[in-house]
Amino acid sequence: MARSYLFIPGNVPRMLQNMDVFDADAVIIDFEDAVSLTDKDEARHLTQLFLRDHLPPSLDIYVRINSDAQLMKDDLIALETLDIQGIVLPKCDQDTLKEYEASQANFRVIGIIETPQGMIEVEKTAMHPCIDGLILGAEDLKKEMGFTRSSQTLYYPRQRLLYAAKAANIKAIDTPFTHLDESGLSEDACEAAALGYESKCAIHPNQVPTINQLFLPSEADLMAALKIVKKHEQTNSMRFSLDGKMIDKPVIDAAKQLIEKSKRYGVKGVL
């Protein structure tokens, strides 16, 4: 699973050419908000040309298409021969998914939940057979709801989307932080990670290193997990005491998952 999902505009050649040097785990090429109506054909054409000949081998690539029916159709036609991980569907709710199904495209979908209707339907959306993950779109949601973005106002949508995704066994991806302020980004990412998110969107390459680092297990958590698994293997028991705490199966399983995640991202101290 990716930690960082970097949005890049589909009509900017230098961003496409450098997508694999930004160190993001995944890239979302944008045909929607970052591209004006008059430039959408250019974004489709440039993306086609680049990905046909220069598909980065170790990078997950998605394309955010448009939710408007005709624009969606044109986007999907442009993508139909490309080997990408899937598409990102904005303003995702049951009506938007019906539009996507009508196209008969067979891409896996990450839906952006960014409207009140989308939030009300998030559990049903998460269970849809084409859905691979969900992104919280806080900026559009706050515009629709009229709230000011803060940890308090994002707590409910973050929690509801996360529970829906976990129940459906799909990815839950936190909303982008829209200011180029590293301390603010760190605080925002830590709040999401504390709730259980394992990944976050980025709107600028400079945000990627911070996100990648903050969504890694901490050294203390990794050391604790290694101790738990070591004692589990030594005792061959699913229930034991360690450092004054009772350890049982859920804790052991969580420790194994944390170690596997650390291995996947090359964290020092685990082989």
Image: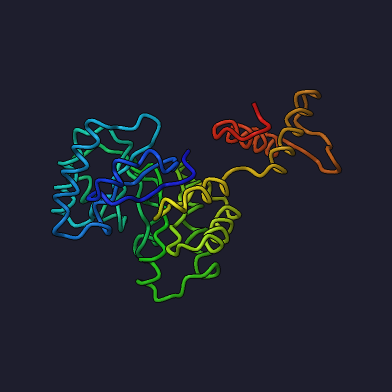
In the rendered image, the residue lying farthest to the right is 244
Q: Is residue 191 left or right of residue 52?
A: right
Image quadrant assignment for residue 129? top left
- Picture coordinates of residue 192 (x, y %)? 55, 56
Q: Residue at the location (29% across, 43% down)?
A: 16
In this view, the residue in front, 226 or 58, is: 58
- Picture coordinates of residue 6 (x, y %)? 39, 48
Q: Residue at the location (23% across, 57% down)?
A: 35
- Looking at the rendered structure, the number of numbered marks drawn on it comes to 0
Q: Is residue 39 left or right of residue 160?
A: left
Q: Is residue 113 left or right of residue 259?
A: left
Q: Residue at the location (20% across, 51% down)?
A: 99
Q: Is residue 27 left or right of residue 151?
A: left
Q: Residue at the location (59% across, 31% down)?
A: 263
Establish if 224 lies above or below 263. below
- Picture coordinates of residue 189 (x, y %)? 54, 56
- Picture coordinates of residue 61 (x, y %)? 34, 39
Image quadrant assignment for residue 239? top right
In the rendered image, the residue lying farthest to the front is 14
